[in-house]
Image (spheres, rainbow, N blue to C red):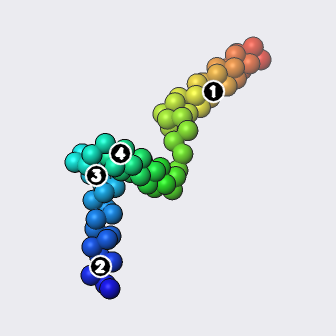
Amino acid sequence: MKPLGSIILVLGLIFVAAGDSFLPKPLSTVSKNARTYVNNIFLSFTPDTDFEKPSKQRDAQVEDMEERVQGNRGELIKRP
């Protein structure tokens, strides 16, 4: 029974990985859809990429700090 399970597993992997390139039309579509489904499952485990680039965040922080420093300098000049 073990060799049969191994053969089925290998054939399934071939079907999902490259079936759309050599199978006839109805099966090639199923193979492509299966591969897309499996890819989406694996991609769901990765973190979302809906974050700004760290350099943009850092630039915003630097600009904010520069505004604060310039504001404080203006106050220091007015005091004397």
User: Badge 3, how many Cα within 10 Å: few under 14, some, many 20+?
Assistant: many
Viewport quadrant of the N terminus:
bottom left
Q: Is residue 2 left or right of residue 69?
A: left
Q: Which marked residue is nearer to the observer: mark 3 or mark 4?
A: 4
Amino acid at dot 3:
Gly
Residue 32 seen by the camera:
no
Label 3 or label 4, whichever comes before in sequence order: 3
Disc 1 from disc 3: Cα separation: 55 Å
Q: Write down the quadrant of residue 76 in the picture.
A: top right
Badge nearest the viewer, 2 or 1:
2
In the rendered image, which residue does mark 4 sit on?
Answer: 26
Measure how far apart labels 4 and 2 are at the Cα level: 26 Å
The amino acid type of the residue labelled 1 equals: Asp
Q: Evaluate whether residue 64 shows in this view.
A: yes
| Residue marked by disc 3 | 19
Residue at the disc numbered 1? 64
